[in-house]
């Protein structure tokens, strides 16, 4: 794999490339979903056209999306476009791009040079794993992954969950804390562990309702030796020095799923005069269409705030609002369309079952009630600080 394909992609044609690839992704999804395997052929095409380098800075051969002072909206448009036909592939691309962008933002010059080259020139993929929720635990999630001094580097023991992209990643950004006093968030760094590292094990435990091709398995790290060169950032940098978040990318994915389901339903209904001529059907479609429009407007208004360089706390607050809207519309659209279209759309030859399963699963990624409590508190006068809250972009501030 060379960087030649990457250089043919520009910030202005990235969305068009995503549309072109989406035609292929939708046809492959049923097989990847049934087998719950990483969509390798999709990512071969993503890498070939260069979309995997969206968050690689321009000086290293990428598009420079999701960089402070740069462009955010085209990145979310790409994710939205792919999610219309394949939420899992969109999510995996998001995970890789965020992991790459974290290194670009917090890494040393040597780390940026190496990892950005691995991505842009060599087509490598990077996962990002924070969660320590375990399948059969009965207690709340606690972050325990800790780097312990060992010789000139560290030793890492951890068990991680929901490791999306594990089926295809070459490197894994493991969220962990340097040993010492203080909260996990204040001590957090990222250890970028290569797939072949001794003591690194991928556990085959991914059998879920939806989002099956994400292969979000668990990881076991047992006495993994981590040299200093693998450690990205100083303790607490992701919380204190990098204002970016992951929130709006999830908004884009949920919106895309809902839009894809709605577009299918419109084509299905238009071909059936007994449905298309019904004012009740027309009215219900109009209601869903308006909600999709409102969600899209919220998403790109929040994205525009990041591009303008507004207060990151206000940017994230609007991002949370847009995510709330996207969750609701994804669940409503993928459910209500069954009533509008009728029983025949429950056959798996149609895409609604896939969309419903994926939306029901993926919208659980963040606890919506906790997010809305944050919004409510801010409206009651309690200052909102994005990375002091328990969100999908920040580990909980536990002691």
Image: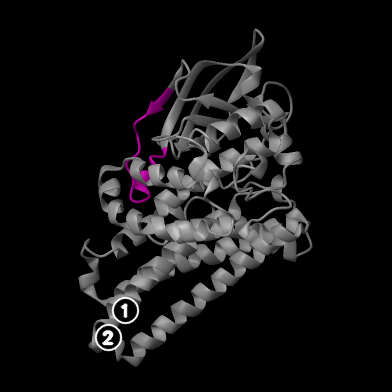
Query: Residue at horizontal 38%, vertical 40%?
Result: 215
- Tell me if 325 is positioned left or right of 205 in this view: right
Earlier sequence position, callout 2 versus callout 1: 2
Task: Decide: few, some or many residues near mark 1? Use Cα within 10 Å; few <14, some 14-19, many ≥20.
Answer: some
Residue 234 x/y as whole percent:
73, 29
| Position of 111 relative to 311 (above/below) | above
Q: Which mark is residue 340?
A: 1
Which one is in front, 350 or 327?
350
Residue 90 x/y as whole percent:
45, 52
Query: Residue at horizontal 30%, vertical 91%?
Result: 277
| Position of 396 relative to 228 (above/below) | below
Q: Quadrant of the C terminus?
A: top right
Q: Quick check: marks 2 and 1 in contact, CB under 8 Å?
A: yes
- Disc 1 on helix, strand or loop? helix
Task: Decide: few, some or many residues near mark 2? Use Cα within 10 Å; few <14, some 14-19, many ≥20.
Answer: some
What segment carries the magenta color?
201-216
Is residue 207 a member of the stretch shown in magenta? yes
Q: Which mark is residue 275?
A: 2
* Alpha carbon separation for disc pair 2 and 1: 8 Å
- Quadrant in which residue 25 is drawn: bottom left
């Amino acid at each position: 794999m060379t960087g030649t394909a990457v250089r043919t992609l520009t910030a202005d044609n990235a969305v068009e490339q995503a549309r072109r690839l989406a035609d292929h992704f939708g046809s492959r999804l049923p097989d990847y979903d049934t087998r719950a395997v990483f969509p390798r052929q999709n990512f071969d095409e993503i890498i070939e056209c260069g979309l995997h380098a969206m968050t690689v800075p321009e000086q290293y051969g990428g598009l420079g999306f999701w960089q402070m002072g740069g462009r955010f909206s085209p990145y979310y448009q790409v994710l939205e476009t792919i999610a219309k036909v394949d939420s899992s592939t969109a999510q995996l691309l998001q995970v890789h791009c965020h992991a790459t962008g974290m290194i670009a933002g917090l890494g040393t010059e040597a780390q940026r040079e190496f990892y950005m080259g691995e991505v842009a020139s060599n087509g490598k993929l990077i996962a990002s794993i924070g969660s320590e929720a375990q399948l059969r635990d009965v207690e709340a999630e606690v972050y325990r992954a800790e780097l312990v001094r060992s010789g000139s580097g560290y030793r890492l023991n951890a068990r991680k969950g929901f490791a999306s992209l594990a089926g295809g990643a070459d490197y894994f950004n493991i969220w962990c804390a340097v040993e010492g006093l203080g909260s996990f968030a204040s001590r957090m760094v990222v250890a970028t562990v290569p797939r072949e590292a001794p003591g690194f094990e991928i556990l085959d435990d991914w059998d879920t309702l939806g989002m099956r091709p994400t292969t979000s398995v668990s990881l076991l790290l047992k006495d993994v030796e981590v040299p200093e060169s693998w450690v990205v950032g100083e303790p607490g940098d992701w919380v204190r020095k990098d204002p970016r978040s992951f929130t709006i990318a999830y908004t884009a994915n949920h919106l895309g799923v809902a839009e894809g389901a709605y577009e299918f339903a419109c084509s299905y209904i238009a071909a059936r005069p007994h449905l298309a001529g019904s004012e009740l059907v027309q009215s219900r479609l109009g209601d869903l269409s308006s909600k999709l429009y409102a969600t899209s407007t919220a998403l790109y208004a929040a994205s525009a705030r990041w591009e303008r360089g507004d207060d990151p706390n206000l940017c994230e607050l609007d991002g949370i609002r847009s995510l709330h809207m996207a969750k609701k519309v994804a669940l409503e659209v993928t459910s209500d369309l069954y009533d509008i279209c009728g029983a025949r759309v429950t056959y798996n030859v149609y895409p609604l079952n896939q969309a419903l399963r994926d939306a029901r699963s993926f919208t659980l990624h963040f606890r919506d009630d906790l997010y809305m409590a944050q919004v409510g508190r801010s409206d009651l006068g309690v200052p909102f600080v994005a990375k002091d809250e328990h969100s999908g972009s920040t580990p909980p501030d536990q002691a």
